[in-house]
Image (tube, rainbow, N blue to C red):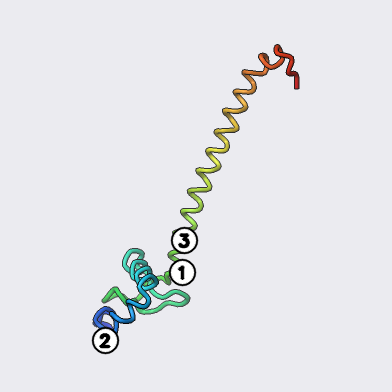
Amino acid sequence: TGVDKIAIQDCEGYSEAFAEHKKTWTYLQHCEEQFLCAGWCSSRQPLWILGTSSLDTCNVVIGQMMGEKVKRVSRQLMDWALGLISVASVGFALLLPAFRKAGLDW
């Protein structure tokens, strides 16, 4: 239909409505363009990308992206913690004779 060929930015009253919802609409536009998704809770026609009809919902795409970021950060934290424990264990093992010699037997 002809509606599919009109970008939302070209609709009457878009500028005024955009000024009211700038933060949210900018984020949604970024999601559609960057991650090729449309709709949030259910699949919808994209608003900012013309000529595309079948896209994943943005909640699925953003959820997967957040999951990957959390997984990466948690892996880094685990690696740092294990590294710190390893260094501390080796340090204590090397310093144990000095502790005993100083009378600090534990």
Relative to residue 13, is residue 68 drawn left or right? right
Residue 95, by quadrant, is: top right
Badge 1 amino acid: Asn
Q: Which mark is residue 12?
A: 2
Residue 37, located in which quarter of the rendered image? bottom left
Residue 64 got which mark?
3
Residue at image location 50% in from the left, 53% down from the top: 70
Badge 2 marks a residue whose secondary structure is loop
Please name the amino acid that badge 3 sits on: Gln
Spatial CA span between label 1 and label 2: 28 Å
Q: Which of the marked residues, 1 or 2, is nearer the chain's N terminus? A: 2
- Compare residues 32 and 13 and report the one nearer the observer: 13
Q: As drawn, is 36 to the left or to the right of 71?
A: left
- The disc at residue 59 is 1
Left or right: where 68 falls relative to 98: left
Crowding near the residue tagged with mark 3, few <14, some 14–19, many ≥20 C-alpha atoms within 10 Å: few
Which of the two labelled residues, at mark 1 and mark 3, occupies the earlier sequence position?
Answer: 1
Residues at marks 3 and 2, CA–CA distance in whole angstroms: 35 Å
Q: Quadrant of residue 65?
A: bottom left
